[in-house]
Image (cartoon, helix red, strand yellow):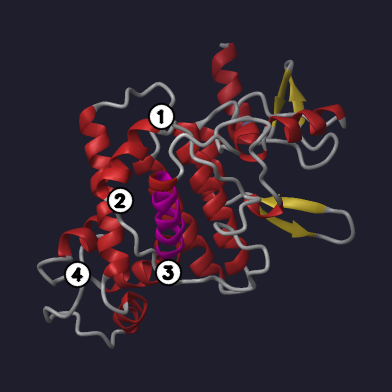
Amino acid sequence: MALPVSMEDTELFPKAAKQLDLTPGTTYDPSAVKEMLSSLSPLWWSRLLISTRGFTINLLHAGDELTLFTVDDAFTAMHARLVGAPDESNGEERRAEREKFIAHIYTIVGFPAVSTALAELARGAGASAEDTSPFVHPSTSEAFTTVFGAPNEATYRIADGQKHAYLVFSRILSLLQARWAQEKGKKKIRFETDPEWQPDNRVVLFEEFGRGNRTWVLLDFDRHILRFWRPRGAAIIFGDRFVEKKKREGLRLCDVCGMLEQGPSQFKALAGFVLCSPECAEEAAKTVK
Ligand SMILES: [Zn+2]
């Protein structure tokens, strides 16, 4: 069964939003999640995270850089845990791990006033040692320590930054679970189908340096996606049509990692390879030997 979603979907990714809505998702239906994990492709899950992360970091960008990087890390962790590698079998055990991870996310966002609780712990003002701390409370400690790490000051700061990612993701995944239950059999726009995948400017972080000089700000999440889907990463993020158009405009892809050139002749050509970075040149040198 297909599930209709894209970045054009304004219920999931409101375009008028000027700041992040940190209202946690409240629908958590374990049987729907189980079905979604087994029925929807790794590409669907990957693009769900690519678009949710793009949406989140673009609204965060006005804030501090530390939070930006921490949130980026949270999406990289979610992608690593939720999306099966293209060559990986979707075995029972792996699926159970993913279900558990999603259950943990809903335990975290469902903790009463979780945003305030984590902010207080990060400030050192929370009741960290008492059983009012979500890291210690018997019904929530497993979820918080599995997702964020053992309770200590560094973990509290990370959790307070990463909460933005989990809250936004939980809201979007709750909407999708409700749709999964309602829209069985309907066929509309799908994340996994090109050219129906319609990412917009918010799919990654762009920075404008002067007029018409727009550059993709490559964060760890972008590198993770490029590596994960290598060498198709640019098309996974921007869609086949976008990449084909850029190629017609004369832009090239790195032969090693699949990164897209931001401007003409940005990448070096070496021994027949187009290479984006010294790292990729090194990697290419290994394959030639
Ligand atoms: Zn490269």
Name the residue that disc number 2 marks.
102
- For marks 2 and 1, the one nearer the N-term is 1
Residue 18: x and y in percent read 64, 73
> Disc 4 residue type?
Phe
- Please say if 113 is above or below 143: below
The span picked out in magenta is: 167-180
Residue 69: x and y in percent read 51, 61
Measured Cα–Cα span from mark 3 to mark 1: 27 Å
Residue 203: x and y in percent read 63, 50
Report the magenta stretch's main SS.
helix
Name the residue that disc number 4 marks.
135
> Disc 2 residue type?
Ile
Determine contact: label 2, label 1, CB under 8 Å.
no
Q: Which mark is residue 161?
A: 3
Q: Residues within 10 Å of mark 3 (few under 14, many from 20)?
A: many
- For marks 2 and 4, the one nearer the N-term is 2
Measured Cα–Cα span from mark 4 to mark 1: 31 Å
Query: In the visual, does 2 lie left or right of 32?
Result: right
Name the residue that disc number 1 marks.
85
- For marks 4 and 3, the one nearer the N-term is 4
